[in-house]
Amino acid sequence: MEEFTQSSPFFKAKVKAFPKEMDIQGVELDASIRNIKETATRIINLSPNIPSEATIAVNNIN
């Protein structure tokens, strides 16, 4: 996600597609997963329409 472009009445964002196959491993992979989980958690916390339990689901992703 590059940036949010709208927040009301719903969130809209400018996104950049990842290549179909990513050749990352180790520390870089761990950092990417952590970043995705943090972004998902922020979106969940900002959206009144997504139940807070969704954060638990995101945190359970290994």
Image (cartoon, rainbow, N blue to C red):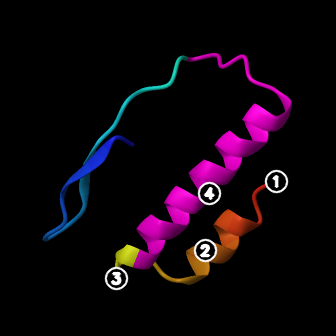
* Residue depicted at 53% across the width and 83% down the height: 52
Residue at image point 77% right, 43% down: 30
Residue beneath disc 3: 48
**Closer mark to the observer between disc 2 and disc 4:** 4
Q: Is residue 18 magenta?
A: no
Question: What's the amino acid at mark 1?
Answer: Asn
Q: Which residues are magenta?
A: 20-45
Residue 55: give its label: 2
The circle drawn on residue 37 is: 4
Residue 26 appears in which quarter of the rendering? top right
Q: Please report whichever mark, 2 or 3, sits nearer to the chain's N-terminal start.
A: 3
The quarter of the image holding the N terminus is top left
Give me the C-alpha separation between circle 1 and circle 2.
14 Å
Q: What whole-number distance in Å separates the C-alpha atoms at marks 4 and 3?
A: 18 Å
Disc 2 crowd rating (10 Å Cα; few below 14, some 14-19, many 20+) is some
- The answer to whether the residues at label 2 and label 4 have Cβ atoms under 8 Å apart is no
Q: Secondary structure at mark 3?
A: loop
Q: Secondary structure at mark 2?
A: helix
Along the horizontal axis of the image, is 30 left or right of 44? right
Q: Residues within 10 Å of mark 4 (few under 14, many from 20)?
A: some
Q: Nearer the viewer, residue 39 or 60?
A: 39
Give the percent coordinates (x, y) of residue 7. Answer: 19, 66
Residue at 37% x, 30% y: name it. Answer: 16
Rounded to the nearest whole Å, what is the CA distance between mark 3 and mark 1?
26 Å
Mark 4 or mark 1, earlier in chain: 4
Q: Are marks 3 and 1 in contact (CB under 8 Å)?
A: no
Query: Circle 1 sits on which residue?
Result: 62
Q: Is residue 31 magenta?
A: yes
Q: Are marks 4 and 1 in contact (CB under 8 Å)?
A: no
